[in-house]
Image (tube, rainbow, N blue to C red):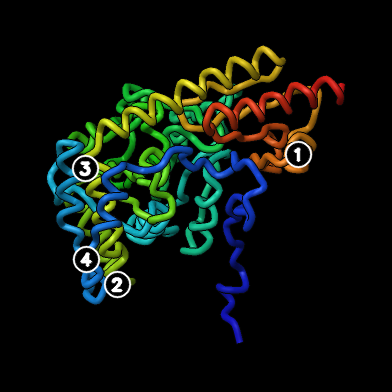
């Protein structure tokens, strides 16, 4: 009844989404603050008649708003139903095994190998440095490759790569192979590579409204790159679904990208709490990787990551644990509001005292 390719699928496992709200959710990197206040006003006054009509398949007004924010042209912007969909289109358009393996970091966003297997693309996981940072020079050691994808900041480590290092890597990488940089968390302190798209026509940046603009529930992602890359993504989209971004979400995206004051206020609040949490964990004896994201990746050599995750869950706090060799003792903790993080830190302090 089912195809062989279906039987071989290993789906992505998302973070737990509990149906009741008895938990403090610090496991899926959601923004703890609501989106732009202008979105509330729009939804209250929206003309319901708009829903009987199809949305603009090109999302032109939204693309112009995104382009204006980054100082590029609308022809350099592609929009999709969340950055995950955009990434899948990238795999289809730019990567194929006949040209070599797809390269991405050993410990990174766990959807990358899922998409590779879904699209039938061979891949190689490039080891991280000993300090868990991405080693871009190691990506250049492969004689043949179909392309590269990596996040900046990386997930789940949260560590960022500087623009100068990215520029140096791109200058050495084959110009006939596409490099996709997944900047889902870039707004929380890393350097965006968008300024490099005019210098490197093989560079594509993928971003999302889910994290820094509090629209995870709306599903809106986008890509920025050379016009030829954007046209390729549009061809893939129109061969799959011409209307991936609905009429409401297009308006929400425009309002969110234009409200820089609200954006900067929430980013400042989240990064300040992140730094406080990092310091507090270090004072409790935890190792905390330097984060440029809205989460921290942390471990304590006295306890296993799985045990900490299970204990916190039993106490009403959800964090993320990845049971992968090399990072199995870490937990990833989303930065919430101050009172949520105080509850987390109080439990962590109590756990270490009672378990050791």
Tell me if residue 148 can be seen.
Answer: no
Q: Disc 1 marks which residue?
A: 315
Residue at image mark 4: 47
Decide: few, some or many residues near mark 2? Use Cα within 10 Å; few <14, some 14-19, many ≥20: few
Q: Residue at x 39, y 24 (%)?
A: 268
Could you tell me if the residues under marks 1 and 2 are in contact, i.e. CB atoms within 8 Å? no
Crowd around label 4: few <14 · some 14–19 · many ≥20 (10 Å): few
Q: CA distance from mark 4 to mark 3?
A: 41 Å
Foreground residue among 56 and 305: 56
Q: Mark 3 highlights which residue?
A: 201
- Is label 1 in a helix, a strand or a loop? loop
**Distance between mark 3 and mark 1 Cα atoms:** 50 Å
Are the residues tagged 4 and 3 within 8 Å (C-beta)?
A: no
Q: Does 349 appear above or below 200?
A: above
For the point 44% across and 40% down, the residue is 150
Q: Nearer the viewer, mark 4 or mark 3?
A: 4
Instruction: Tell me the distance, in whole angstroms, between the alpha carbons under discs 1 and 4.
Output: 44 Å
| Comparing labels 1 and 2, the label whose residue is closer to the camera | 1
Looking at the rendered image, the disc whose residue lies closer to the viewer, 3 or 2, is 2
Name the quadrant of the C terminus.
Answer: top right
Residue at the image point whose x is 38% and y is 56% from the top: 218
Residue 322 appears in the figure: yes
From this viewpoint, which residue is outermost toward the bottom? 1
Instruction: From the image, tell me which residue sits under label 2.
Output: 239
Image coordinates of residue 84 in percent, x first then y, are 42, 54
């Amino acid at each position: 009844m089912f195809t062989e390719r279906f039987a071989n699928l290993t789906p992505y496992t998302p973070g737990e989404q509990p149906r009741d709200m008895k938990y403090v959710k610090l496991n899926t990197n959601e923004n703890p603050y609501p989106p732009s206040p202008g979105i509330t006003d729009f939804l209250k006054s929206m003309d319901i008649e708009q829903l009987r009509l199809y949305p603009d398949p090109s999302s032109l007004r939204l693309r112009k708003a995104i382009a204006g924010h980054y100082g590029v042209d609308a022809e350099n912007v592609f929009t999709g139903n969340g950055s995950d969909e955009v990434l899948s289109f990238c795999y289809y358009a730019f990567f194929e095994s006949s040209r070599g393996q797809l390269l991405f970091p050993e410990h990174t966003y766990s959807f990358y190998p899922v998409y590779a297997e879904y699209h039938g693309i061979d891949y190689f996981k490039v080891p991280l440095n000993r300090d868990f940072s991405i080693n871009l020079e190691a990506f250049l050691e492969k004689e043949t490759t179909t392309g590269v994808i990596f996040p900046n900041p990386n997930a789940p480590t949260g560590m960022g790569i500087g623009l100068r290092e990215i520029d140096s890597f791109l200058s050495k990488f084959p110009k006939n192979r596409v490099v996709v940089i997944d900047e889902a968390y870039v707004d929380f302190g890393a350097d965006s590579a968008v300024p490099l798209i005019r210098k490197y026509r093989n560079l594509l940046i993928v971003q999302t409204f889910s994290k820094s603009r509090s629209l995870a529930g709306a599903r809106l992602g986008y890509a920025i790159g050379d016009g030829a890359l954007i046209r390729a993504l549009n061809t893939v989209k129109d061969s799959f679904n011409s209307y991936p971004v609905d009429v409401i979400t297009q308006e929400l995206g425009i309002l969110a990208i234009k409200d820089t004051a609200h954006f900067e206020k929430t980013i400042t609040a989240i990064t300040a709490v992140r730094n406080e949490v990092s310091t507090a964990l270090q004072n409790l004896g935890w190792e905390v990787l330097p984060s440029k994201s809205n989460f921290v990746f942390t471990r304590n050599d006295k306890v296993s990551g799985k045990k900490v995750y299970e204990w916190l869950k039993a106490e009403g706090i959800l964090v993320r644990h990845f049971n992968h060799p090399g990072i199995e003792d870490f937990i990833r903790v989303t930065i919430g509001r101050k009172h949520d993080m105080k509850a987390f830190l109080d439990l962590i302090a109590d756990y270490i005292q009672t378990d050791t």
